[in-house]
Image (cartoon, rainbow, N blue to C red):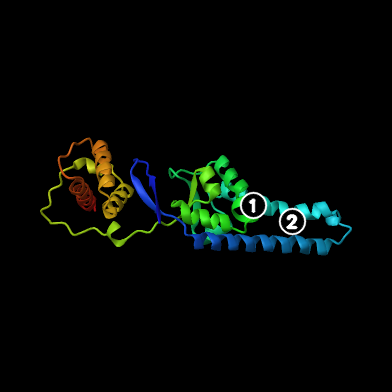
């Protein structure tokens, strides 16, 4: 399952949505971290004894539970959409437009996790993610976010460059203004076999290059890729 987001050039690119299994495993890793914190606090209380700072029950309980309650919110906000578990599973929270989630988005996810995860033991979250189609639990829907894999799947055809004829003649010198990232994006668009996406990308690239091609969208994009490779190889 994938989620289409926009690049800086407003070209749609598919990112792989984190699976339910990835998210459950990430949550389990976070629970392991929480358990480690509880053991630490209990150990400190045992060392200090009943006469220490943790002699008050409310203080001991707060020191143990408050960091656990706030950890998901604070980690996602300060660690760019990731908790320790999400880091371990290489997944992260982003907005549906591909940008970094805002504090309000993280806050909504955090508050609604009480319904999604805590009260119903994650059943609501699992059902919502399975049904939604964008890999969103209730908190994600409210916050306009999704959880994606930080390393999108890239197929071999996205990066392989076919050998060029030594007599190859480029058509669009302005392709030198593009970057390697732009070309990788174009390759992914071509590999998607989505004709509407290909045509949209063609018009975006035409605008960037300042040309008006009469070629079919797929032919034009391959010409751009090959021209870029020609000039890149000429500089070596």
Q: Closer to the camera, 229 or 146? A: 146
Can you give x and y, in whole percent of width and height, for residue 135 in the image?
47, 53
Q: Quadrant of the N terminus?
A: bottom left
Q: Which residue is mark 1?
A: 71
Can you give x and y, in whole percent of width and height, for residue 60 in the image?
80, 55
Q: Is residue 73 left or right of residue 219?
A: right
Q: Which mark is residue 22?
A: none
Q: Closer to the camera, 130 or 157? A: 130
Q: Is residue 146 left or right of residue 40?
A: left
Can you give x and y, in whole percent of width and height, for residue 101 in the image?
51, 44
Label 2, secondary structure: give it: helix
Q: Name the residue rendered at 46%, 51% in the picture.
A: 132
Within the image, what quadrant is residue 106 found in?
top right
Q: Compared with residue 120, is residue 102 higher up or lower down, i.e. above or below?
A: above
Is residue 80 in view from this perspective? no
- Determine crowd level at label 2: few under 14, some 14-19, many 20+ residues with C-alpha closer than 10 A: some
Can you give x and y, in whole percent of width and height, for residue 201 in the image?
28, 43
Q: Name the residue rendered at 20%, 36% in the picture.
A: 211
Q: Compared with residue 153, is residue 174 higher up or lower down, i.e. above or below?
A: above
Cα separation between marks 1 and 2: 12 Å
Q: Closer to the camera, 236 or 220? A: 220
Q: Residue furthest left?
A: 167
Q: Which residue is mark 2?
A: 64
Q: Residue furthest right?
A: 51
Is residue 124 in view from this perspective? yes
């Amino acid at each position: 399952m994938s989620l289409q987001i926009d690049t800086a050039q407003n070209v749609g690119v598919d990112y792989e949505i984190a699976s339910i299994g990835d998210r459950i495993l990430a949550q389990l890793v976070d629970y392991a971290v929480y358990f480690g914190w509880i053991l630490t606090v209990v150990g400190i209380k045992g060392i200090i004894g009943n006469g220490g700072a943790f002699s008050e029950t409310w203080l001991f309980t707060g020191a143990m539970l408050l960091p656990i309650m706030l950890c998901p919110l604070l980690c996602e906000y300060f660690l760019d959409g990731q908790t320790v578990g999400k880091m371990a599973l290489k997944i992260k929270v982003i907005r549906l437009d591909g940008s970094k989630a805002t504090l309000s988005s993280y806050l909504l996810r955090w508050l609604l996790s009480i319904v999604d995860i805590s009260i119903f033991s994650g059943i609501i979250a699992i059902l919502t993610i399975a049904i939604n189609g964008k890999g969103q639990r209730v908190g994600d829907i409210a916050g306009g976010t999704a959880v994606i894999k930080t390393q999108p799947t890239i197929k071999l055809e996205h990066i392989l460059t076919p050998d060029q004829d030594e007599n190859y003649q480029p058509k669009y010198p302005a392709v030198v203004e593009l970057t390697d990232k732009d070309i990788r994006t174009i390759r992914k668009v071509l590999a998607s076999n989505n004709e509407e996406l290909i045509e949209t990308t063609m018009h975006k690239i035409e605008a960037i290059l300042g040309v008006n091609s009469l070629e079919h969208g797929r032919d034009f994009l391959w010409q751009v890729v090959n021209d870029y490779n020609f000039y890149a190889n000429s500089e070596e």
